[in-house]
Every structure is written in C-alpha cells, then in structure tokens.
Amino acid sequence: MKTIRFAPPIALAAALLLLGSAARGEDPTALGPERAEPDMELAFRAPTGVDPGPSAPCGSLGGRSFGFYFGLAGKQPLEVRIETFPFFEDADAFARRRKAEMAAQDRAPEAEAPFAGGGFDRGLRISWKPDAKGKAAVLCVLKRFRRVTAVTCEFPAADREAYATVLEGVLGSLRSTAREPRGLPVPPGWRTEATQNFEITTDASSPVSKALGALLEAALAEARRWFPAARRPEHRNLVLFFGSADGFSRFREEHEIRPEALVFLFEDERVLSLGVLPESKQSRRFAAAEVDILETVRGLFEQFALHAAGRRPEPWFTEGAGLALGAGFGPDLRHDRARAEGELALGVEEALSAKKPPSLDDLFGLPDLGEPEKALAGAWAFHLLAAPALAKKGLLQRYLAALAESGDLNAARAAAFGKEPVTDWSRPFAAQCKAAAAKARKAKR
C-alpha cells in the first residue's frame, strides 16, 4: 500500500508561515475554509495558511492521497496523512491491517472508539501510545459505500494538549461528499453492465460480456453453496474485463502483473481483472465468453474469499478451493462433482509421481504455489469439501470463518485443524486420489 511522502522544504515552509501568523496576533490553531477533494469524495478543513496541495495517486486503481504538516512555535510538527481507497469496501479489515503494521513497529494501541458524523456509513478511531521516539498517533478509518478513507495524525506525545484543538478540528471537519457507490472508471468506448452480483466494466461485445456474467454468477452460486455462512459484500463485485488479449496484456505490463496471468485480483481494490484469451490459448476455453473456465472460476473464488475473510487467505486455500470449484465447470455452466474429482485426481497423480513430490504439510506457509503444489491443493480441498466424513467437519468453512473473525492466518489454521499435522485429517486422501484417477482414465478411453 503506497503512502504519500512529505518533503522537508514543504514542512519548513508551513512552519514559517504559521510562525508568521502568530507574530501578527492571529490564532495559529484556527482552521481555514472547507476544502473539497472531488477525486477522493471528501471535504475537510486544514489549519489557516496550510495548503496541502493536490492529491496524488495511491494504490492501483483510483486511490488518492495527500498530507500536510502543521507546526507551532518551538514544537515538532503535527503530520496529517489522508488516503482513500475507492474499492476497498471493508473498513474493519483495513483497520486490522493497520493495527498489524503498527504492531510490527512495536506500537501499542491506547484507545479505540467509533467515529460518528461526517456523512460516513461507519468509522473507527484508534489512538496509539508513544513510540520509542515519543511520537503518538491517531488513526481514523472511515467508510462510505465502497470507499475506505484513512486519516493518520502523528505528533509529539509531549505536545498532545498543544495540538489538541487543531487535531480535533481537522478530524471533526471531515465530510464525505459521496452520494452513491462509485464503480470503476469507464474509459471512452467502454461501458458497465450489471448482473445480480457483479458490475462488469468492459469493452468486449455484449454477447461476450453477458456470457462472462453468466459464468461468474454460476460459479458464485456454487461457492456460496460450499460456504453458506461466508460474509458477503454490501455491493456488487467489481470486474474489469478486456475485450482484447492485447489490451489485457498492456494492462498487465502497466501494473506489473506476471505476463502469463489470465486472471488477476487487486487485493486493495477487490477488483477481478481478466481479458479474452489469445487465439493460441485453447486450454479450457469457454467459447461464449472467450475466457479460460478454470482460471476464471479460480479468480472468482479468490475474490469471494477476500470479501468473506477481509484479507487474502493463504494460497493453499484460495488455489485449492478455487481449483476444486473451477474443475467441475464446463460450458453448460453446471458444476459436476464427478468431473471435478476426475480432473483433480489426474492432476495430483502426476504431481505425486514427480521425483520430489509436494506434501500436504509443506503447502502451509508457501507464498506461491507451483503447478504440482496447486494440483495437490486442489485435490485436497475437494477431498475436504466432498468426502462425506470430512465435509461434515466443515474444516475449510471453519478456516474461512476464523480468518474473518481474527484476520490472523495462524489462528485460522489452528481453528480449522488444531495442532495435529494436516495429514492426520486426510489419511484416506492418497487412496481416494488413486481410485479417482483410475476411474477418470477409464472414462476417457
């Protein structure tokens, strides 16, 4: 997550300006007129004489940020940073992330309370104890529709009372100017199409985009059958769909996405991006939408899990359950469990026959999964979701619910599997895969 940086000359200029106003007998803590930031859908009042300047891009898709310093004579300045993420949607998850970041810096929270007013849907105010350098901090996380705004104020703890009037004035002046949920920007030649659960911004032909919408709706319905208690987003899921392979290729390059990715999910914006397949790519092509069924459904599940948990789960979960979901879909847009079992079993059989086959216990903690690990994760997830005895335990459902509650990956894993090795939960797994692979090979003859 990118944050704005402040150049020392700007801080010095602001401090000199405030010292000058004090010399003229003016109240240096008075606030100036309200300032509107249309791109951030936000209005606020800065101290008199302080000009924060224009906002700058922050994040990947539409985020903006800016900041300013405010100094009193003989004191270190108060620093204010304001960032908005237009499609983050989950204020609680954002606050948990910032708490974790502060904890990593040995910063301990001091107080936490709701933030009311300003036309926001909800808000949270968190105060932190002084750090080793004596700096205290206040963070406000504010939500309006999909947009999350973070306001961070840092100041010398010893000067808390001196800066209290300005600090409370700036925070109290914050006001959302949003009147409706904002969707993705729509460039010339593009349009937005809405289904029951998705908002697709695209330049593809209408039949192609409608076919994609049908696939996403079918996959989401199946995901919700597997995880019925999972938290759902308040607004439609956002999808960016490129009608040309070249257009998606340029987009990947611009955002430094690996060139071979057929589907990509921006975590901070919760936006699923994909494009039509190149003519040379024929793997699991869904002809009506010109996309790869397996990868599209896997990406959809990652978006589903991100909304449900408030953060991206571990790859073994998203890749595994996503592949278990995607492997069962065909052009008829129905999830066939027998089809999923056969395809996953063949994949994992090949992975386990390698010289150094992956193991279930090794999947945990891996930041990225290779193809053998993905095959193993997919077959294992399907085993946990479909095998009657294990399906009753709801292990993966328990993992997702625990992650949504705590935001902690280790705690979620412990809640699902306890302290026992993963393999203790899946002793019949290898035998089941072997039998399913033999059955799938026989069906293909």
Image (spheres, helix red, strand yellow):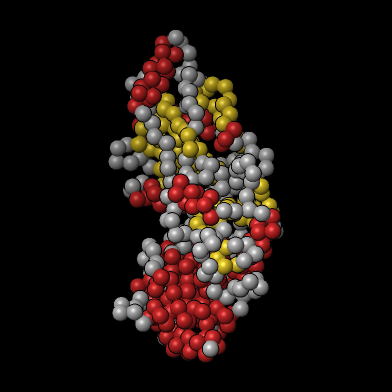
Q: Position of residue 152 (x, y in %)?
A: 45, 38
Q: Position of residue 139 (x, y in %)?
A: 47, 41
Q: Is residue 254 left or right of residue 325?
A: left
Question: Looking at this rendering, what residue extends furthest in the top direction?
Answer: 24
Residue 175, placed above or below residue 50: below
- Give the quarter of the image for residue 186: top right
Q: Position of residue 386 (x, y in %)?
A: 55, 80
- Give the quarter of the image for residue 44: top right
413 or 306: nearer the viewer? 306
Residue that appears at 53% across and 60% down: 278
Q: Is residue 327 visible?
A: yes
Residue 84, placed above or below residue 31: below
Q: Position of residue 16 (x, y in %)?
A: 38, 17
Residue that appears at 38% across and 25% down: 11
Residue that appears at 58% across and 65% down: 230
Q: Is residue 389 visible?
A: no
Residue 198, placed above or below residue 5: below
Question: Looking at this rendering, what residue extends furthest in the front direction?
Answer: 280
Residue 305, placed above or below residue 440: above
* Number of numbered labels in the structure image: 0
251 or 97: nearer the viewer? 251
Residue that appears at 35% across and 50% down: 104
Q: Is residue 180 left or right of residue 302?
A: right
